[in-house]
Image: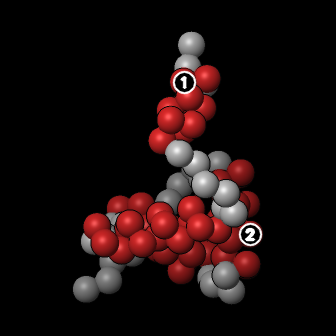
């Protein structure tokens, strides 16, 4: 059964960002707030194979290959 929730003291910046997101997605403020809450509280679980496939797709889109040693060196550069 759906419930009603009233939010108080929403910071102006948060309200504006929510309003802009709702407008961009062509949703009401209420619907956008629900989508935002669902994405944080109940994120969609993906299986290991799907996660690996997404990572490989992202890597392929970079147009360059990084090797493990290069990645370790780059990570080490950012550490004090």
Q: Nearer the viewer, mark 1 or mark 2?
A: 1
The residue at which mark 2 appears reads as 20
On the image, the x and y values in percent for residue 40 come to 42, 61
Observer able to see residue 44 = no
Taking the spot 53% from the left edge, 45% from the top edge, the residue there is 67
On the image, the x and y values in percent for residue 55 come to 47, 64
Q: Examine the image and state in which quarter residue 25 appears.
A: bottom right
Colour theme: secondary structure
Q: In the image as oriented, which residue stretches furthest toward the top? A: 80
Cα–Cα gap, marks 1 and 2: 38 Å
Taking the spot 74% from the left edge, 69% from the top edge, the residue there is 20
Instruction: Work out whether residue 28 or residue 49 is closer to the camera in this orientation and state it.
Output: 49
Q: Which mark is residue 76?
A: 1
Q: Secondary structure at mark 2?
A: helix
Q: Which mark is residue 10?
A: none
Observer able to see residue 3 = yes
Q: Is residue 22 above or below residue 72?
A: below
On the image, the x and y values in percent for residue 59 come to 56, 62
Label 2 neighbourhood size at 10 Å, few (<14), some (14-19), many (20+)? Answer: some
Label 1 neighbourhood size at 10 Å, few (<14), some (14-19), many (20+)? Answer: few
Q: Secondary structure at mark 1?
A: helix
Taking the spot 64% from the left edge, 68% from the top edge, the residue there is 61
Instruction: Work out whether residue 43 or residue 68 is closer to the camera in this orientation and state it.
Output: 68
Q: Examine the image and state in which quarter residue 2 appears.
A: bottom left
Taking the spot 38% from the left edge, 67% from the top edge, the residue there is 51
Q: Is residue 46 above or below residue 73?
A: below
Q: Please state if 71 lies on the left or on the right of 20 as rendered.
A: left
Q: Please state if 45 lies on the left or on the right of 20 as rendered.
A: left
Q: Earlier in the sequence, mark 1 or mark 2?
A: 2
On the image, the x and y values in percent for residue 60 come to 59, 67
Total numbered circles: 2
Q: Quadrant of the N terminus?
A: bottom left
């Amino acid at each position: 059964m759906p419930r009603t929730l009233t939010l108080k003291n929403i910071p102006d910046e948060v309200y504006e960002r929510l309003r802009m997101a709702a407008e961009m997605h062509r949703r009401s403020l209420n619907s956008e707030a629900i989508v935002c809450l669902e994405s944080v509280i109940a994120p969609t679980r993906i299986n290991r194979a799907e996660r690996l496939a997404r990572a490989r797709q992202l890597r392929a889109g970079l147009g360059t290959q990084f090797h493990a040693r290069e990645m370790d060196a780059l990570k080490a550069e950012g550490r004090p």
